[in-house]
Image: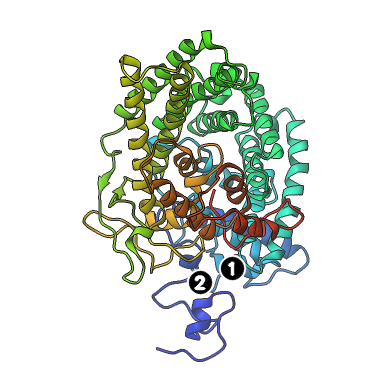
Amino acid sequence: MVYGGKPSAGCLNCKRRKIKASQSHPSGKTSQDLLFPSTSNRQYQTQITQNRVEGKKTKHTKSNPPNASAGKSPLPIEGTKSQQLAGRPLSPLLLLELSPSTSEDVAVCKFFDSFTFIPRHPDTVRGYMECLPSLYTATLDGSLLHQAVASVSLAIAGAAPGNFRDRILAQTRFGEALQATNRAIKDQEESIKDETLLAVLLMGLYERITSIAEVSALSGSHDNGAFALVKHRGKKRNTRSAAAIALFNAVHAQMVEHALEESVPVGSNLAEFTALASGVPQTMASRLNTISTALAFLRDNARTVLGEHALRDRIPSLLGDAFATNQQLTNWAQSVPLDWPATAGFLDTPADVPRERFVYCGRIDVYYDLFVATTWNFYRAIRIQVLKIALDCFDAMCIPSHGPFASQRQTIIEDLQGLVDDICGSIPFHLGTKMIPGYLDNPSVEFPYITTKATSVHRRAAAASGGWVLVEPYSEPLIVAVEATCTRDGQREWLLTQLSRVADLYNFAPILAVMRKKVRPSSNTVYSETSLDKLLDKRSCGKHATSDTFHGA
């Protein structure tokens, strides 16, 4: 049915179908669904919208006299209890009408839907995004946390072609958040709040996604600031709630990730934080994070023992430490929940594209969800690096070709090959048949499945960050797999092709910088450093990304 009259402002669906501005929406996709297509976390979605509308409405009514229709929404939605108490129905459409610059509100709504309102296995939680909805709804518009969220959301939105205004606005919001942070950490009450700690972590994320440097010094300073806040809060406040514990584990994860970066030596902060973490409740993912701390110390020792002036008398001790860490990782893998191991699946690939572009040697693994797959790949990346240190120890000892040491060395090589194969098998689950850039779900993209097609939840998660989690700084499973030695012929070239594919799909500065610095491709691969140089040269002023798509968070 086609409706006459003036189209409703704000909703593209209404404009296309020529729905009158005064008419209640018919059945179908509404503005609410356009911004929040997920049915989960609906209460938080409504509250987040209400929070932003409340601030915009206050600003709006200061300069305009109230009228009878000021609080009415042309698209009434079913309200939660908090809405009923507020006494007026709310919708993203009203939010857009009240806001003088709607791009920020749209960016925030899409950020929440793509990166926080996605169900996940509870044992995969090791970050801080899971805490964001509840803490965000508890704060007012214009608060430090809202400014930090806005800066990250706009940085993501600004990565799209032509969104230069969003990139500039993201920098403005980030500057405001920095000023608000300086005020908050000087205030005794504000400095111990979960919202303040979460805002500092988000600002570190902003620096990470907008910096072209492989390791952003600014991002590290935010993480060090978060560590200082954790110490200031004390153990009692760090364990007083589920959100506080999650934030504590998130800061620990950030400290470990910085230490795992080769160019960053292990500092006293990591050792001190590891001591603080004892006794704090952990998920499977945070347990893995604690175990991976050993890799940071192994690397430090390996630089000294296996360096230019090798200390041969200390090699057996280093080898023993590597074996002990490898055993800890093996024990972790054997203790995961029963629904975590991958299952062989199927993938429908385009008829006009070689299947080898998406699948390596027929390996198609399906996981419980993207976050479980990401946790497995983090485990694989850590274990590969531990085994490489052990292999370097054997090579430095110049062991004979026969004997117990030779047998152990061969076992390490076989384990390395198996771990790299597992990473290859996970790539279809992360990327599917995606060939067009963008962080929103594309219906034409196919993902692996067992009996039924991939769920909308997985499609949204993979579209938003499936490629990014394969190359994210510090864990870098895809890059670690490329650098692994003793892989079979042709496997490294296939991995390099996937790395090039990720660069095309998630064309963002940190990914490209890591690839150009760490990976040295062979001449017979489609991946080339020259093409990366051209992409990197497009970055404005060498500091902020001007990419076509966002990798995720």
Q: Is disc 1 surrounded by few (<14), some (14 to 19) or many (20+) residues within 10 Å?
A: many
Three-letter code for the amino acid on which mark 1 is drawn:
Leu
Q: Earlier in the sequence, mark 1 or mark 2?
A: 2
Question: Relative to 116, does residue 98 appear above or below in the rendering?
Answer: below
* Residue 16 x, y percent position in the rendering: 50, 83
Residue 191, image x, y percentages: 69, 31
At label 2, counting other C-alpha atoms closer than 10 Å, the crowd grade (few under 14, some 14-19, many 20 or more) is many
Where residue 401 sits in the image (x, y, percent)? 35, 20
User: For the N terminus, which image quadrant?
Assistant: bottom left
* Residue found at x 69% / y 31%: 225
Residue 82 visible within the image: no
Q: Which dot marks residue 428?
A: none
- Secondary element at tag 2: loop
For the residues labelled 1 and 2, say whether their Cβ atoms are less than 8 Å apart. yes
- Mark identifier at residue 75: 2
Q: Which residue is mark 1?
A: 94
Front residue of 59/340: it is 340
* Residue furthest out toward the top: 313
Q: Is residue 269 above or below residue 32?
A: above
Amino acid found under the numbered disc labelled 2: Leu
